[in-house]
Amino acid sequence: MQRETLAQIRFGYGLGGNRPIASSKSALLGEAKEASRAKPRASSADRVKVFLNYREARKSENESIQKKARQALARNSMNDLRAVLQNAVAGPGFGERLVQFWSDHFTVAANGPILRVLAPDVADNAIRPHIAGRFPDMLRAVTLHPGMLVYLNQVQSFGPNSRAGKRTGKGLNENLAREILELHTVGVGSSYAQSDVRSFANLLTGLSADKGGFKFRKGLVEPGQHTVLGRDYDGQLAGITQALEDIALHPDTARHLATKLIVHFIGGTPDANHVDDVAQAYLASKGDLSQTYDALLDHENAWGETFLKAKTPFDFIISSLRAAGATKADIDQIKPSELRNGVAGAMQLMGQQIFRPAGPDGWDEAPEAWITPPGLAARIKWAVGFSERIQEGHDPWDFLKRALGEAASPLLQFAVAGSESRVEGLALTLVSPEFNRR
Amino acid sequence: MQSRRNFLTRSLALGCTAAASPLVTPITLASTPGDARLVVIILRGAMDGLDVVRPLGDPYFAGLRPSLDLAGSHDLNGFFALHPALDALMPLWRSGELSIAHAASTPYRDKRSHFDGQDILETGGAGIGKGGWLNRALSKLPGTTSETAFAVGRENLLLLSGDENYSAWSPDSDLDLSPQAQLLLEKVYEQDPLFQQAAARAMELADLTDKPMSPRRAGRAKALAKFAADRLREDTRIAAFSINGWDTHANQNNTLPRALGELSSAITTLKAELGATWGQTAVLCLTEFGRTVHENGSRGTDHGTGGAAIFAGGALKGGHVLGAWPGLSDGNLYEKRDLMPTSDVRSYAAWAMNALFPLGKSELQTHIFPGLEMYGNPGLIL
């Protein structure tokens, strides 16, 4: 198999896009840099404004004002969905895959109006700019983002002995502290204890948010020194930043991130030497992600010809759009109702509710989690409907070549040639194992 | 080349595709292992047992949760009272079709991670390996087919995963393909067992679903329960699904009743839809761990240890709150913060399976829950 084909399938969103194909390691790393510089759809301030307008209008007694507010919120979400689709379909493949990977690593689920607005902003403004930079910077940007502070209840955490804590009698909420250790950094396999979680929660008490975005509230800070993973910090912003930097550069974080990257992009049981190499590159570069990806790509397993992973429903739909030759402009033309039913609704039937994973651990990496009887049935149904829509512009045989190149098995070629209608021929490519794996 | 015009003008949204066609192999009705039915509902997110089954008789309880609402509780036995959002289950309590195990937990301790906690709840213990305990139980039942156990819903249920075949389907699925397309699909999937098995099952099951439902977010549990009951009235003996929404870190007075409403509707739907079969049914509602004894700073509760399990069904010898009560004074808490577990929630599941199916105690302790000490029979089932 040609390296170009393999790179597009495994590290990008599949063949058929309208950009030059990156296949060398340096070209892939270039795609990461390029994606990190892409303009966000909106600034954080603009997005917060959407929510504030919504909240204000909800107070109104006037039904039509209320309705307009709901519509504006829905429109904002549709714009976010459209922008995510456009980037994935037409952007630099490896870079856009990394934006999704890190957005999943730092899951903020869009539950409720405020998070519907803020969750896509975390990806746009806290994650994307750092995907080719330093992980400690990304961790800091995400941890201080109002979306994460709301999602993991940090805005409701009070130092029990802080001024505000004593006045109101309110206390700690451990959620963010726990998930940073368990999911975002050292990982649950690391040897931290409940006392570390508690102490870290005490340390983070000043982190909060208001209308202006992130806000450090001195009045909430739990006084004293807090010991996390054996080091002492005070609860001021500089102390918190130092703690995040130290935890980000902990050897357990390096191994946790290395393992996750390998599981996500390559799959199977991670090769121990490969994990060592990637973790070593991460530590040696003090958390530089480009050097980390370099080590990820610099291993024979990264170029093995067996595809062990299954595309998620999102990735499956993106690959289908690319195979059909969709451009950014085409995606602009999709009506909101079609985005809702044909993309978001279809993804939900395939088992993935966009922007809303069930918990902070994000989407499942195992192929078995997605290729289930109901999940595959939903892909087949969508593929048939999609093929009906694109049939006039595509010959099944050319479509197969465009979508899979030499990754199409002889068996699939035989089946496409033997299909009795154009729609079935197109749909067979879309539902084939080789199109759904990577 | 693709035609620009078509891409732009044609809708992406799905219409109904081809007319229904006779689908491949019809399900063969096979011999089944007895008549008892077991439903396991996983409550994901850690249900606050202390708020659901309130120890109002414990002198420390009210003081630990000053802003959590205790009004409207339904007295159970003079000491414990049921959350008002479980109203609809009180008739079951009175007729001996509902029991609670309190201060129960899995062996999971200390890190209080949902995901690890759920893994241990579903695999049946730490370090046991990959599959779920319900799958291992299945391997020890005589005469099982892939119909015997059903995972309902769109998630991959660890509880039922493993070497034994089981079915997975969601009540909002359907599949219409021409016979020719189906044949080609089967051919293409021959090269990949994961796709081959999923597709074969989808084609069979599409035939069984009379009319696809589209469960909305609220009422999803009802749709899952209805589908499970439809299967359980036929050859299925074990069904499992999950209900989310228990991670009540904030404003528990509002967030917990929503999840309880779903649970309550799942149980009452099972009873209504199972009809006479309800008499042979036990429903086990299990969660990964309990929540902190003290409320937190945001009128919610954080991850804890000891929790509660809810059991329902006509096969129950119900009307009991099982398990020794550890008390809520500071000295009686686990790590000064959590309800002290006094029993292993797996032992209730083990004893229930012992009563419902031909599964012996030693088999349960060595094979299904390796390392579990079941102790005495709590008398959960008639």
Image (tube, coloured by chain):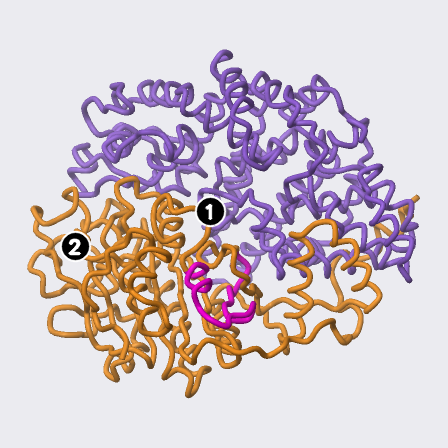
Q: Is residue B59 left or right of residue A145?
A: left
Please tell me the colour of chain A.
Answer: purple
Quadrant of the rendered image containing residue A420: bottom right
Q: In this view, does B306 lie to the left or right of A108?
A: left
Name the kind of residue labelled 2 in the image: Pro
- Residue at point 33% right, 55% down? B366
- Tell me which chain the residue with mark 1 is part of: A
Magenta range is: B134-155
Name the kind of residue labelled 1 in the image: Ile
Q: Can you name the residue that lies furthest to the top here?
A: A284
Q: Name the residue under label 2.
A: B66
Q: Mark 1 points at which residue?
A: A114
**Is label 2 in a helix, a strand or a loop?**
loop
- Residue at point 53% right, 15% down? A281
Among the chains pictured, the one given orange colouring is: B
**Residue B224 picture location, percent across and down:** 50, 69
- Residue at point 16% right, 33% down? A161
**Magenta stretch contains residue A72:** no
- Locate the C terminus of chain B and report the quarter of the image it occupies: bottom left
